[in-house]
Amino acid sequence: MADEAPVKSKVFTLASGPGAKVTPEPMTLVIFGASGDLARRKLVPAVYGLWQDGQLPPLFSLVAFARHPKSDEAFRGEMREAVAKFSRGRTVDAKAWEAFAERVHYRVGDYDDPAAFRALGAQLDRQAAEEHRPANALFYLATPPQTFPLVVRRLGEAGLSRAGAQAPPWSRLVIEKPFGSDLSSARALNEEVLRVFDERQVFRIDHYLGKETVQNILVLRFANSIFEPIWNQKYVDHVQITVAESGGVEQRGPYYDHAGALRDIVQNHMMQLVCLVAMESPLSLAADAVRDEKAKVLRALRPIPAACVPEGLVRAQYAAAEARGKRVRGYLEEDGVAPGSVTETYVAMKVLIDNWRWAGVPFYLRTGKRLAARLTEIAIHFKPIPQVLFGAPGRGPVEPNVLAMRIQSNEGITLRFQVNVPGPAMQIEPFQMDFGYAEVFERAAPEAYERLLLDAALGEPTLFTRGDEIEAAWTFLQPILDGVRQCPVRRLPSYPAGSWGPAEADALLEADGRRWSLVRRPAKTA
Ligand code: NDP
Ligand code: BG6
């Protein structure tokens, strides 16, 4: 009789993440801009989540630094509400919250005031001395990007950067996105930061890298032997990456109107997804080995020359529309958006990677706000079969295989292949084999910010972008931005809010004899 022993899953315990055995050293997290939207919706709920799950050391503390005067009590109250509202699936445990809140302090200070930074340093030293521990500090820049250089400078002047320190206390710096608004500002920011901190102390956030399903791209590719041999131009026809958002610009109109989809999503999240799909196997999982391979992909991107209408690029803006019986505002009606703005809320583009593996394989990227659904999907479209047997005239061509990785939502992996429908005549139809995280694993994936905060606290940089990666991504984007700047237009093509984007994006693929497609997975059942 065949051996029918159940297949056991092999559990690897990583340095961080759920099930991690390692706890960071005693430390203080200092959030600059703690009165802001990011701190409230993402950072503090993530820190509290880690605390409640026992992933932070007992001698952890949080210093919230901002200009608005506020008492510790008032800040703690606001954060309790924020945690209750935004924390992922957890109820706030009263006892855990009480212990956590005691370790949260609000510090009023101006980002330009050297004395405020010296006082912050004194506070960190005092608390560490009282607790008989080193004054380790994780500084988190959650202020508007134009203030990043200033805060970094002030940290250096106050002696808080501790660059070159070989022993505790250590300092680390987490920098939010956007890292620069073009190539020269990104370079300048890198220089500013590296004047004060060593690269190994710097953690540049791209929160997509903290998503479990994004990390799983590498596992799918390199922990399985069946995909690697076909993961190249011999077998892959093209790749589609969709980062679709159903929401609009929300409260972030003023920021978004200066950024647009190219800077907000393409330069960072989208480029990171391209890297993970296209990179060679790294020599190890060490941070620099992984980042070296990602940087090579970015450097191999074929430049899109500056032009008034850059080849292979579509930019568009959402227009007001009815969706589910409700009128949805157009981009130009959003708060904080300049009248007549020509900032793009949608981008579709064709990207080529000039290396041996991917020569001639187009990567079609699209991202937008106010699209029909919130969904991020990477789909590898394989080459069609020679249509001599099954694709004979009268039967129509047989659809090629597609392997889709659903990053969010309804996370999973789907393989589309052909089957013969039972019956007297041969009838070939595509069928989908699905793997869904929610159905297979009982444990929910941690929030991206939980994973990233924990990794930064542990000094583990793999899921953060290195300075050269960021500059390589900007190098690719810069000619496109130049073309857009040099050729002002009065309006952009538009798409109705709640649709899948403008007709121009469909035409981009149709010109290559292809079309956008999403591999829908059945929604999970309760
Ligand atoms: P906010 O505009 O809410 O700013 C955060 C805080 O920074 C403010 O509450 C303010 O606090 C302080 N601040 C310091 N200097 C200034 C200034 N010159 N103008 C306005 N505020 C200032 O930003 P978010 O919280 O939305 O974002 C923080 C950072 O995170 C930004 O760099 C952003 O790009 C990034 N980010 C945000 C995301 C989000 O979803 N919100 C997503 C991804 C990245 P005070 O006045 O009390 O000092
Ligand atoms: C941020 C962008 O980096 O990512 C936002 O600034 C965007 O505009 C967000 O909405 C999307 O992140 P997520 O995790 O919701 O896909």
Image: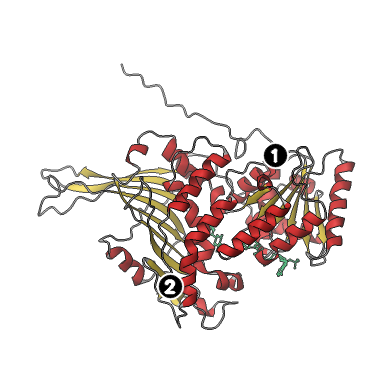
Q: Residues within 10 Å of mark 1 (few under 14, many from 20)?
A: few
Residue underneath mark 1: 54
In-image side of 422 versus 63 (left or right): left
In-image side of 184 versus 111 (left or right): left
Q: Is the residue at mark 2 in contact range of ligand 2, meaning its CB lies under 8 Å from it?
A: no
In this rendering, is residue 293 above or below 245? above
Q: Which mark is residue 491?
A: none
At x 55% / y 56%, what residue is drawn?
A: 471
Disc tally is: 2
At x 42% / y 55%, what residue is drawn?
A: 301
Q: Nearer the viewer, mark 1 or mark 2?
A: 2
In this rendering, is residue 293 above or below 481? above
| Closer to us: 358 or 333 | 358
Location of residue 65 by image quarter:
bottom right
Q: Residues within 10 Å of mark 2 (few under 14, many from 20)?
A: many
**If the picture is divided into quarters, which one holds ligand 2?**
bottom right
> Is residue 26 in sight in this rendering?
yes
Give coordinates of residue 243: x percent, y percent: 45, 59
Give amino acid for label 1.
Gly
Quadrant of image for the N terminus: top left
Residue underneath mark 2: 316
Give coordinates of residue 521: x percent, y percent: 38, 51
| Closer to us: 66 or 470 | 470
Give amino acid for label 2.
Ala
Which one is earlier in the sequence, the residue at label 1 or at label 2? Answer: 1
Secondary structure of the residue carrying numbered label 1: loop
